[in-house]
Image: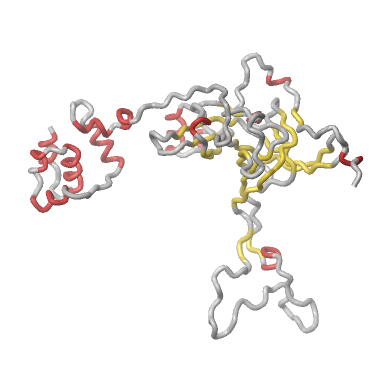
Amino acid sequence: MFCSLLKTLNPEAFPIRVFLCSVLQNQSYCDLLPHRHRLYLTGSAMLALSRGLVSHLQRVAVDSPSPLRFLSSDAAIQTRVIDPRPGVMTPNSKRTGLIAVKCGMSALWDKWGARIPITVLWVDDNIVSQVKTPEKEGFCALQIGCGQKKDKHLTKPEVGHFRAQGVPLKRKLREFPVTEDALLPVGTSLNVRHFVPGQYVDITGITKGKGFQGGMKRHGFKGMPASHGASLSHRSIGSTGQRDTPGRVFKGKKMPGRMGGDQRTVKNVWVYKIDPARNLMWVKGQVPGATGNFVFIKDAVYEKPDISLLPFPTYFVPEDEDTDNLKPLVAELGDVDPFMVAD
């Protein structure tokens, strides 16, 4: 069959013929090539072919017991079975993160009367949409989906991705690298109890876009004099270089330009309270992004939480738990009033 396939190929389709011969690794098939083309089969000449050609060869050889069987990924890669059950977290373990929606800022007063600036985050229906394993992708990671979206608002490749994984259509996707012991099966639901009150997290988001701004607003320049002969240059940045030496403006010079709209990470954000019934999280301080933007939350890198308190690899909801009547969980503030402590 492959002899006839090689003969019917266009003589100009040299890469396809070389690929077939290198796959078959049979001298009788390689003899069908011209001498000048046969020389390319020696050494380390590996030709990269498109995925469409490989799929075509798989369809051609689907009913034939040929060496092309190894092109099938299912035959070479064994499917890993991931059991969704609680485990033991080690100091080297790395859990997945969550995707949340920024709801805005407010302020709360703790039991000692101290005012705490608060950002409210909503963990909207997080689910594991894809699992990446060392056997297939070469590394361990979990793709998390958040929110809901109609298929008419997604591209066909995006819809095909969700249908292939067997998960609902999601509005936002994010990949989180994890360790091998923190893998979760596709379809696992994640809620706000993945984090515990009192721990520190790192939150990543896209800052508010400010448009084209000047040097004073963008970089905090002092500006030029307001009087004493200064005219039409009160908010200018001043000189940007020298004269003949070097005769140019150095790269990276702080100048007016586009401001905001960049990815920024706020580290060591304290989790003050969580509400499991509404999937809300209250964190102390500000979070990058506008109200309604997506933010990505993961365990803090520097202020590492106590691994004995964290659910690993995530929090699994018991079957007999009434999720609608759960009370909010607040961080432990201690038994000593900080306002009554002597200096």
For the N terminus, the image quarter is: top left
Q: Does 156 appear above or below 261?
A: above
* Viewer-nearest residue: 74 or 127: 74
Image x and y of residue 329, in percent? 74, 28
- Residue drawn at x 55%, y 30% is 127
* Viewer-nearest residue: 134 or 104: 134
- Residue drawn at x 74%, y 80% is 231
Query: Which residue in the rendered view is the most extreme toward the bottom?
Result: 244
Left or right relative to 144: residue 23: left
Q: Which corner quadrant of the image does residue 2 belong to?
A: top left
Q: Does 39 appear above or below 24?
A: below
Specify the color scheme.
secondary structure
Image x and y of residue 137, in percent? 40, 38
- Residue drawn at x 54%, y 78% is 248
Left or right relative to 204: residue 31: left
Image x and y of residue 235, in percent? 72, 72
Is residue 271 in view? yes
* Viewer-nearest residue: 182 or 72: 182
Image x and y of residue 275, in percent? 72, 29
Is residue 289 in view? no
Left or right relative to 285: residue 63: left
Q: How many circles with numbers are drawn on the protein?
A: 0
Q: Which corner quadrant of the image does residue 279 belong to?
A: top right
Left or right relative to 216: residue 84: left
- Residue drawn at x 85%, y 41% is 114
